[in-house]
Amino acid sequence: MTVISARSLDLTFQTADAPVHALSGIDLDVEKGEFVSLIGPSGCGKTTLLRVIADLEQPTGGTISVNGMTPEQARLKRAYGYVFQAAALFPWRTIADNIALPLEVMGLSKDEQHKRVSGNLALVDLTGFEQKFPWQLSGGMQQRASIARALAVQPDMLLMDEPFGALDEIVRDHLNEQLLKLWAETQKTIVFVTHSIPEAVYLSTKIVVMSPRPGRIHEVIDCNLGKDRPLEIRETSKFLKIAQKVRDGLKAGHAYD
Ligand SMILES: Nc1ncnc2c1ncn2[C@@H]1O[C@H](COP(=O)(O)OP(=O)(O)OP(=O)(O)O)[C@@H](O)[C@H]1O
């Protein structure tokens, strides 16, 4: 089942000096349960594409459907959870209260809120941190809490914009492993923005290589490494071959200026 389908998607931002052609002729299908990474140099439109899927930006051309609906309908039905580059937790609320916030907005009972908070904290391995404040947690733990918050609304889909970009490599490795486990357990569809080739290859079933000016899809690369991926898989020739293909795609689509 196709959950995201974009055809000839275009987006031009009107700015004070000149229009910015952020997305051009984007055709993309994401199937249910896939893990799709968007990779490409800075400014190639990765975040913009994710924001169009999330109904945070309006395309200026083409069509897009999310779960068979318009992005606006999908947003209103809470079809997805969005995870930002920074954890964006409210410093004055405890971790439990941060995760409960969207549930309060939805008007769920205290009981249901409590169930979802503890269930999702367990899923991201943060049981016991309910009453801590965000500043008492490491950056990696904060990002895990923001993933729990996105999952708490029980979306079919997670949209993740470089969630681990600011973390050191060891923490990032650990979170990549945890995210894969979570993906296998919950069978969510995930669309994930990254700058990192190894991260994209390690996590994805499909890698969308984008290129800039205007932002477009250069190549879509299948990443059929199976669901069981220990970190050591990154040293196998199959992994390295896919990584090389992504690197070649990035090079071919890169503008050096
Ligand atoms: N609200 C906006 N108004 C005008 N231009 C914008 C706006 N948002 C993004 N852009 C421009 O659109 C292009 C694509 O930006 P986008 O943030 O989607 O790229 P990206 O691939 O996610 O980059 P990065 O990897 O640096 O986050 C860039 O040239 C950017 O400057």
Image (cartoon, grey):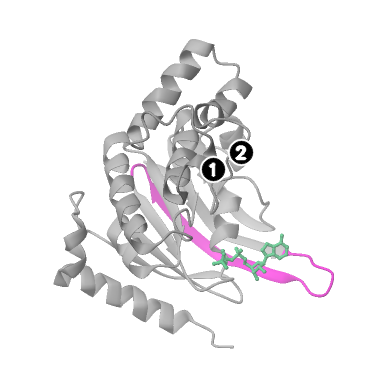
Residue 225, x across and y down, in percent: 20, 58
Query: Quadrant location of the C terminus?
Result: bottom right
Q: Is there a contact, CB below 8 Å, between mark 1 and mark 2?
A: yes
Q: Is residue 14 magenta?
A: yes
Asked which quadrant contains residue 121, the reply is: top left
Q: Secondary structure at mark 2?
A: loop
Q: Is residue 206 above or below residue 113?
A: below
Please indicate whether residue 85 sits to the left or right of residue 239 in the image. right
Q: Is residue 138 above or below residue 200?
A: above
Q: Is residue 23 above or below residue 228?
A: below
Q: Earlier in the sequence, mark 1 or mark 2?
A: 2
Please indicate whether residue 167 sits to the left or right of residue 199 in the image. right
Farthest residue toward the front? 136
Q: Residue at x 52, y 30 (%)?
A: 99
Write the start and end of the magenta stretch as one range. Answer: 13-33
Please indicate whether residue 67 sits to the left or right of residue 9 in the image. left
Q: Residue at x 48, y 11 (%)?
A: 111
Farthest residue toward the left? 236
Asked which quadrant contains residue 221, the reply is: bottom left
Q: Majority secondary structure of the magenta segment?
A: strand
Q: Residue at x 26, y 70 (%)?
A: 242
Residue at the disc numbered 1: 135
Query: Quadrant location of the N terminus?
Result: top left
Residue 145, x across and y down, in percent: 46, 38
Give the crowd class for mark 1: few <14, some 14-19, many >=20 residues within 10 Å: some
Q: Is residue 162 magenta?
A: no
**Who is closer to the viewer here, 74 or 17?**
17
Q: Is residue 243 above or below residue 189?
A: below
Dot 2 amino acid type: Pro
Task: Kindly identify which numbered label has been placed on residue 91.
Answer: 2
Asked which quadrant contains residue 18, the reply is: bottom right
